[in-house]
Image: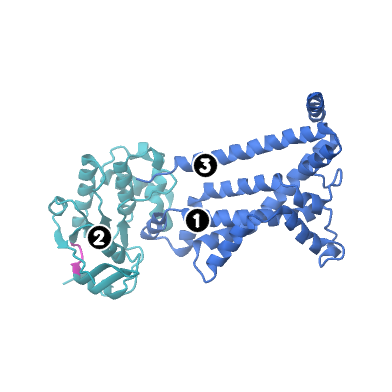
Amino acid sequence: MNILFEAHDLRKCYGSITALHLPSFVMEKGETVVLTGRNGSGKSTLLRLLAFLEKPTSGVLRYAGSQTEPRREITLLLQEPYLMKASVFWNVTLGLRLRGVDRKLAHNGYMESMLAVGFTDPESMASRGPGELSGGEKQRIALASRLILSPSVLLLDEPTSNVDAASEKAILNAVRSLRPRGVSVVCATHDRDVPAALEAREIGIVSEPV
Amino acid sequence: MGYFSEGMSKALALLLNMDDATFSAIQATLSSTSCALLVAATLGLPLGFLLGYTTFPGKKFLRLLSDTLLAFPTVLIGLIVYVFITYRGPLGQFGLLFTLPGMVIGQSILALPIVISWTAQAVENLDRRCRETLLTLGASPSQLALHTIREIRYDLGMVCVTAFGRVVTEVGVAMMLGGNIRYSTRTMTTAISLETSKGEFAQGIALGLVLLLIAFLVNFLLAWFSDTRDEHEHSF
């Protein structure tokens, strides 16, 4: 078995509050997993741990058999994405420029990733600012800024909440298209249709009260 | 009110005729204030950023100290610097008292807490998702810091404009450290104070009009920075 994430007795506490207690979690490379559970069950916390944005309070979390942080292989789309105070083009290509990619290659990546999230005319969007975008457009642009990086692992926190039906469809299509490319996906959601739409393994998160 | 209208017409004549004493005061004000802002921004922006961005023991105390210094009376700053640069003081050998550089030292001290505190505040007020977004896009620690600065660039502009506005309108430091010497260290505010005490309203009004114009420009810049920042707000 080609294990991507492996966690044992994973616990994350904020002060006296236990946000997550996961006895066991195993995920294979290339797999698509959907995390379901009630509000406050720890889905977002687990995603933040998997993204190595935070460290667990106790327990073991391994990525590809190692406990070292895999910088730039994993990316997380936040539940309420943040767009920088700049143009759409700047936002989508930011990750590439952080990696030193030149503008021409970044432009090609911009076109591909914007088309992947359902924008039919990316050029017309390029110079728009965050204030000129709808919630669904922001969500898709934030997703495009992750897809452009060709990540090994894509983590999504409620990607279809607060978006219109057309944006939801575009987002799910984009995520589904990652499977043939071997990208591993972990998606937290309340939407009951998402596991089936992504043809994903569903894992219910129920943090045990301590 | 006759003396007021007479003063106003004389004031306009001074401005239109480019009166030497009036324009000398304007020049002294703008040069000392600009230098003070340059010093305060050079020291204060990095210090304020570090104060807001990093966590270290004693940070809360430094933040409190910086905030307290925002209310530092200008005459007290003048007094402290005076003690240091007076001819018998530890820096007396440099002959800074009653010179523009001496005024710049005091005005820089006045502006520094404003720049430090407000810069730290801007960093602390930045949406925490900005940091997380940069990290999830693969930013290194230095890239994280640079892009954080980029995100608060309009706030930093507002910080500098606010500090400039505070320094350009102060009297205490300029009077105590500059000595209000005509054609040398006489600024707009000290000139207004002096001319009014002499009952000569014309030059006071003329300088007051210029000061009002500067205040308007400062506020115009503040509004522009604020509007530009708000245009880029994008929370859900």
**Residue at the disc numbered 3:** B226
Of the numbered discs 1 and 3, the one sitting upstream in the chain is 1
Name the kind of residue labelled 2 in the image: Gly
Mark 3 neighbour density, 10 Å: few (under 14) some (14–19) many (20 or more):
some
- Span highlighted in magenta in the image: A26-31
What residue is drawn where x is 42% and y is 60%?
B139
**Residue at the disc numbered 2:** A40
Q: Are marks 2 and 1 on the same chain?
A: no
Q: Are marks 3 and 2 on the same chain?
A: no
Name the kind of residue labelled 1 in the image: Val
Give the alpha-carbon distance from disc 3 to disc 2, as whole Å.
37 Å
Shade representing chain B: blue
Instruction: Residue B108: give x, y in percent of width and height.
Output: 70, 55
Mark 2 neighbour density, 10 Å: few (under 14) some (14–19) many (20 or more):
few
Q: Quadrant of the N terminus of chain A?
A: bottom left
Callout 3: chain: B
Disc sitting over residue A42 in the figure: none
Callout 2: chain: A
**Residue at the disc numbered 1:** B123
Q: Are marks 3 and 2 in contact (CB under 8 Å)?
A: no
